Image: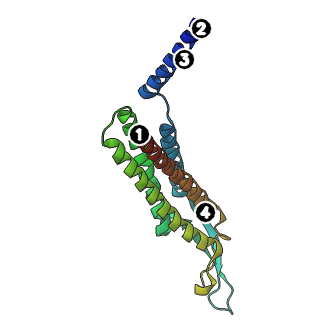
Amino acid sequence: MESQYIGSTSGMEQQKEVKIANQRGGVTRESILRILALVLTLTASIVLGVGKQTEIVSIKLIPTLPPIDVPATAKWHYLSAFVYLVVADAIACTYAAFSLVLSFANRGTKNKLGLVIIVLDLSMVALLFSAIGSAGAIGLMGYQGNTRVQWNKVCNVFGKFCHQVAASTALSFLGSLAFFFLVVLAVLGLSRRSM
C-alpha cells in the first residue's frame, strides 16, 4: 500500500513538472501554427512576386493580311487582384513574425496583449480570405475566359504564370487556415478558462 501511494505522488509531481515546463518555454501548438503561417504566406508572396512569363502571340488585325507576332508578358503587378494578394501575404507574413515574438514575450502572463493578438489573428484571416477570393476570381477568368463579354482565356498561352498564381493562391489559403486555427485555439483556451 505504501509503495502505491509513493508511486501516485511521484506521478502527480511529474504532471506538475510538465505543466511548469510548458509554461516556461518550448514549442507550443500556437508557435507551430504561427511559424507555419509565416512560412506559407512568405512562400506565397515570393511565388507570385517572381511570376513572369513572356510569349509570342499572333494578332490578326485585318482578315486579308497575315497575322503579326507580338511579344506579350504576364506579370503579377499587371492585375490589381494579384497585387492585393502579394501585399496581403506580405502583411500577414510580417504580422506572423511580429506576433510570434509577442507570443513568446507574452507567454505565461495574463494581460490585454493576448486579446489584441487574437483580434489581429482574426483580421489576418479576413484579409487573406478577401485577397484569395479576388485573386481566385481573376485566376478563374484567366483560366476559363468569359464568352459573354468576349474575354478570351489566357492560361492556354501563359501556362507557367497561371500555375504560379494557382500555387500562390493555394499557399495563401493554407496560411489563412493556420491563422484561422490560431483563432480557434484562442477561443478554446478562453472557453476552458471560463469553465
For badge 2, the amino acid type reads Met
Residue 11: numbered disc: 3
Q: Of label 2 and label 4, which has the lower sequence position?
A: 2
Which residue type does callout 1 highlight?
Arg
Whichever of callouts 1 and 2 sits on the residue coming sooner in the sequence is 2
Rounded to the nearest whole Å, what is the CA distance between mark 1 and mark 4? 48 Å
Residue drawn at x 60%, y 59% as measured from the top left: 164
Question: Which residue position is annotated with label 2?
Answer: 1
Is residue 89 positioned above or below 67 on the image?
A: above
The amino acid type found where label 4 is placed reads: Phe
Q: Quadrant of the C terminus?
A: top left
- Left or right of 1: which side holds 100? left
Residue 88: image tag: none
Sequence-wise, the earlier of marks 1 and 4 is 4
Q: Which quadrant of the view contains residue 154? A: bottom right
How far is disc 3 from disc 4 in space, using C-alphas? 58 Å
- Mark earlier in primary sequence (3, 2): 2
Q: Secondary structure at mark 2?
A: loop
Q: Residue at x 35, y 35 (%)?
A: 106
Q: Which residue is mark 4?
A: 161
Cα separation between marks 3 and 2: 16 Å
- Mark 1 or mark 2, whichever is nearer to me: 2
Measuring 50% from the left and 31% from the top, which residue is drawn there?
27
Task: From this view, report whether residue 116 is shown above or below residue 163.
Answer: above
* Residue topped by disc 1: 193
Q: Which residue sits furthest top?
A: 2
